[in-house]
Image (cartoon, rainbow, N blue to C red):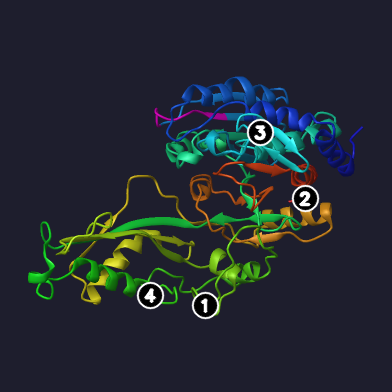
Amino acid sequence: MTGTRDGAIARAQGGYDDGIFLDRLARLVAVQTESHPPERKSELERYCHAVLGPMVAALGFETRVLDNPDPVHGPVLVATRLEDPALPTVLFYGHGDVVRAMPERWRPGLDPWTLTVEGDRIYGRGTVDNKGQHLLGIDAMAAVMAERGGRLGFNATIMVETGEEAGSPGLLPFIRAHRELLAADVFIALDGPRVSRVVPDIMLGTRGGIAMDLVVSLREGGHHSGHWGGLLKDPGVILAHAIASIISRDGRILVPGWTPVQVPEAVTAAARAVVSEPQPGAPVPEQDWGEPGLSNAERIYAWSSAIVLASVSGQPEGPVNAVGGTARARLQLRHTVDVDGAQVVPALRAHLAAGGFHEVEVVPVTERDMFLASRTDPDDPWVRAVEDSFARTVGRQPNVIPTIGASGPSEFFKQELGVPVIWIPHSYGGCGQHGPDEHGLGSLFREGLGLMAGLWWDIGEGRR
């Protein structure tokens, strides 16, 4: 008996209806896997060895828990299932760590480490970021195997790291050290919120994130403003004018090399076709801000954005009548692969020098690793296969989002393993991830189980 695609989808969604998925998710959520700072390394290890690991091993995967090259941080669970060397291999990624639980900020009756179901909402730290999402993919695999008589129809490697919320320390050297173990034909990860609860998303990459400080240091201390105002340069004024030369009054980026010279037509078309919905409690995009002539989707998914994260001159907590000696601001640029990240800081230095801002020093921020920009071609055959599979399951075309606004480790996998990278989110914008009252929607989990079971079935059928 080989089963059917519809049967696999019904099995996957039946696991949600019967409460099996929620019971398993409750066990994952109960492990207190905060990773930043890494004070719960033993919990990260327990998650891999004693909780998630056995769930995966029960499906016939060979599991191993490998050390992080950065010894301060938690391990990486890698589980492999080889059915036939001639079949394609899927590298399925997730992360078991979560941000700080902040139990004092959750509303009464909710506990971050206890799964609580209220109607369609499923509360708990990690329900969507990311325990619920990687469990969804694993349970969908289990449904396909049950329907197909114990086979997936393809080879699979499941990789769950435990440091993503801390910036994935050690991830790049880990991939390099285990390149053969992680070798695959495609990388698929479930993470993040959808831009619409009605239309599934396929996300193809992440924007790069680069931070830098502008420092104006003219002299030690301050000098009486009555005696020296008008005679000494004000570092705060110089800094303000420098920032104004970088970002215009209406939010346009003015630094050559910080924005794409040309965006591929497939990327532009995909961005323009994205169907989104207003998010409850979210601000409304301001149409008079940013690059003119672009849609909101293009500004986020196909362009660069620059903001001032912080700025200080003098003593804001207790101003005094003095001309200050220093001023400082931190800027952040989010950019797509169409901008060379290595040239961002040199481009800014050249821009400021050309504008006569010789007093302004540009200091790159290196206190945490910054992710590189990444993007899979929207016309890649694997992308089209996922798109076709989702349309077949739910009867509507999914969004194909070239580059999400956030940053992530996509390029590490893309560069080191040479695979197309595809992210598939099963949450929504109001889920509260990284804040109190994090929750997933049961309706999206149930639909996601069906989507992923259909996709795994199609890959096993050779639809790729």
Which image quadrant is residue 60 in? Answer: top right
Residue bearing mark 3: 109
Say which element carries label 3.
loop
Q: Residues within 10 Å of mark 1 (few under 14, many from 20)?
A: few
The percent coordinates of residue 86 (x first, y second) are 70, 38
Distance, label 1 to label 4, CA atoms, is: 16 Å
**For the residue labelled by badge 2, is the local secondary structure a helix, a strand or a loop?**
loop
Binning the other alpha carbons within 10 Å of mark 3 as few (below 14), some (14 to 19) or many (20 upward) gives few
Decide: is 345 above or below 260: above
The residue sitting at the right extreme is 1
Point out which mark residue 288 bears.
1
Range drawn in magenta: 70-77
Q: Residue at x 49, y 75 (%)?
A: 291
What's under tag 2, amino acid-wise? Arg
The reply to whether the magenta stretch includes residue 71 is yes
> For this rendering, which residue is in front, 171 or 72?
72
Counting residues from the start of the chain, the first of labels 4 and 2 encountered is: 4
> Total marks drawn?
4
Residue beneath disc 2: 463
